[in-house]
Amino acid sequence: MRQRFLRRRTDSPKLPLAPVGPVLLGAFAVAIAVAAGVFYAGWHLLHAHGLQPQHRLSSDTLFDLVKLAFGVVAGSGALVALVVAFRKQIVDEDGALREATRLHTERFTAAVSQLGDTSAAVRLGGVHALAGLADDAPSRDLRQTCIEVLCAYLRLPYTAEADLPAGDPALRQDFLANREVRHTVIRLIRDHLRLDTDARRSWSGHDLDFTGVVFDGGDFDEARFAGGTVSFESARFTAGLVSFIGAEFTGGRVSFTLAQFAGSRVTFSLARFAGGKVIFGSTQFAEGKVDFNGAAFTGGTVAFGDAAFTGGAVSFDQAEFDGSTIDFNGAQFAGSTIDFDGAQFIGGTVSFGRAVFGGGAVSFDRALFGGGTVSFDSVSGARPAGLPSSSPGPLPSGLVLASGW
């Protein structure tokens, strides 16, 4: 990471300054063109048709010519001074940016060294230092580097509490201290994602890489995922509560591909999916509980393609599907308890194409089908509870059931 940071600094583009001579010639040419244009416009505005010839110059005319000559010389000097001052301003601004970058580099090095300390208290100081450094970064790339280091800390090898050997209080104390540092990283990221997307300190729109991270708790409540790429791919939710209550997914790409929900409780209650793409492709819901209760799917795409619901409970109770494209194509419902009780399907497209209902319990009790398209085309297995019968009356608008049912 240190080498990558220095490479960005070394490869920064040089200051684009043209040679002074051509710049001055260009400035004089522009000045003459402007003066000629002003003279030409004044000539026509005064309706002048020619010049009155004078065979002898009067003293007043000669004095006017002298003043004109001195005015041209003074104007040329002022023009040269303006060009030089402008170039000096550019150089000073670039120098200030380079100095800010140098100071940023020194602070970055100190903060990263703190993250590698054996003391949890020192590591906590490094975490806060990096977050503050990201806020003060003189460029977006330098801020992204700080964010990447914080995410990389979460990706370091981590032993879950359930896997700790029994009867070793010192090891457990080290684990609790390390967990506090990790949860502090998550909390700081959440705090920055809660800010308005156009706020100076907001991290919305930056890339966040949680690939393979072990989550045994964490709070992303009311976070705004409004751009960039956020990866929870292959992450493992093993214990505790990981909360996305009231989070907003309004842009960019958020991926939970191959994530494992096994033992923890993960809640997306009241979350809003209104843009971008959120992917739960091939995700394994094996244990614990995941709920989208009261979530609003009003835009963008949410994909559960080929997800495996083999244990635990997944709930979409009172969720609203109105405008999004929801994809359960190829999902396997075999062992979990899945409920869409009271959900409202009033717009957009929800597809269960090729889904397999082969175990557990899937319920659509009190679900409202009032618009959009909800398709169970080419599914197999037992019929979920709560779906309207295909006979004797017509199906609700937009509902497509498998012919085998």
Image: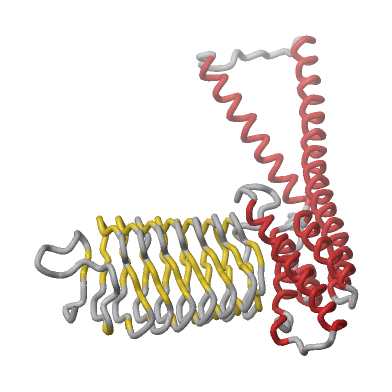
Quarter holding residue 58: top right
Check the picture and name the quadrant holding the C terminus. bottom left
Residue at the front extreme, as displayed: 167
Check the picture and name the quadrant holding the N terminus. bottom right
Image: 158 above or below 142: below
Residue at image coords 62%, 68%: 241
Picture colour scheme: secondary structure
Tell me: 236 left or right of 166. left
On the image, the x and y values in percent for residue 97 come to 81, 55
Q: Nearer the viewer, residue 171 or 116?
A: 171
Tell me: 219 left or right of 128. left
Quarter holding residue 190: bottom right
On the image, the x and y values in percent for residue 80 come to 80, 39
Tell me: 208 left or right of 344. right
Quarter holding residue 326: bottom left
On the image, the x and y values in percent for residue 87 come to 79, 47
Residue at image coords 88%, 68%: 121
Q: Nearer the viewer, residue 195 or 102?
A: 195
